[in-house]
Amino acid sequence: MRQGRSPEAIWADLVAEDADERVCVETIYASLYAGVLGVRATECLRSRRPRRRCRQARRTHNRPALPNISGRPAAANDRSEPGHWEADHLIGRGNRSALMCLTERASRYSMLITMPNGYRAADALVGLAEGIEQIPLHLRRSITFDQGSEWALWPQLTDTFKMNVWFCDPHSPWQRGQVENLNRQWRWWFPRGTDLDRIEPVHANHVAHVINHQRRPSLGYHSPATLYAALTVQ
């Protein structure tokens, strides 16, 4: 980036070097604007726009209508088809820090992603990209959000990963009940008032590992980790 190369050019180089290990263009842009690359957008992008993502998140005109959860297919609702996810944030002290949770509806498998820079729209996009890139392609069918402003960059998500996106109705958390119930488990480890920006990825992964390996009555006393491992095999 410091040499003046565009994110798209960097992505193309990564593809040419290794077709299996690479990040998408949007991840590079989002990481840059989130401040995690150690270089400012004003120093390396040709547009020199310092807050491109945040400005886009505030625009309401010409923004696509939110895809309502009523359009989510029955196979996602009844959990008969794997690859449908729910996402939410666990908010820390003073609403200044967060952890992102992604959970797969069929297996109840979950990921916990650290958000060291907060949970604004650009930061949420970085966290989503980090999580989705760990998911096999055949399990990237859809993801369901609430109507929080942190999900404002969802069109970039659908463009990059080709996943369907659904939004709950306002003030209807039960429409995304799996991730809401899971938040109660996370809170045992991260009580309200915790500074979540201090949580290391290693610890977040450990907590997710413990929860994913617990056998559950709703799964016939199998664990989410066991069921998800079976789903990842095509």
Image: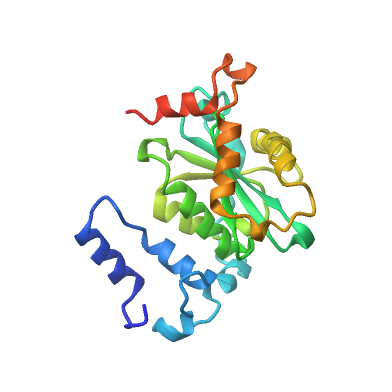
Viewer-closest of 176 and 11 = 11
Q: Quadrant of residue 118?
A: bottom right
How many labels, in total? Answer: 0
Percent from the top left, x then y, of residue 120?
A: 63, 64
Residue 157 at what x, y percent from top left?
Answer: 47, 54
Q: Residue drawn 73% across and 56% down?
A: 92
> Furthest-top residue in view?
220
Look at the image and tell me whether residue 81 can be seen: no
**How is the protein colored in the picture?**
rainbow
Q: Quadrant of the N terminus?
A: bottom left
Please indicate, yes or no, whether residue 147 appears anywhere in the rendered image.
yes
Q: Quadrant of residue 6?
A: bottom left
In this picture, residue 40 sits left or right of residue 59: left
Q: Which percent across, then down, holds residue 79?
A: 54, 25
Q: Nearer the viewer, residue 55 or 97?
A: 97
In-image side of 131 versus 211 (left or right)? left
At x 59%, y 51%, the residue is 66
In the picture, measured across the screen, residue 219 lies left or right of residue 18, that is: right
Considering only vertical position in the picture, is 74 above or below 129?
above
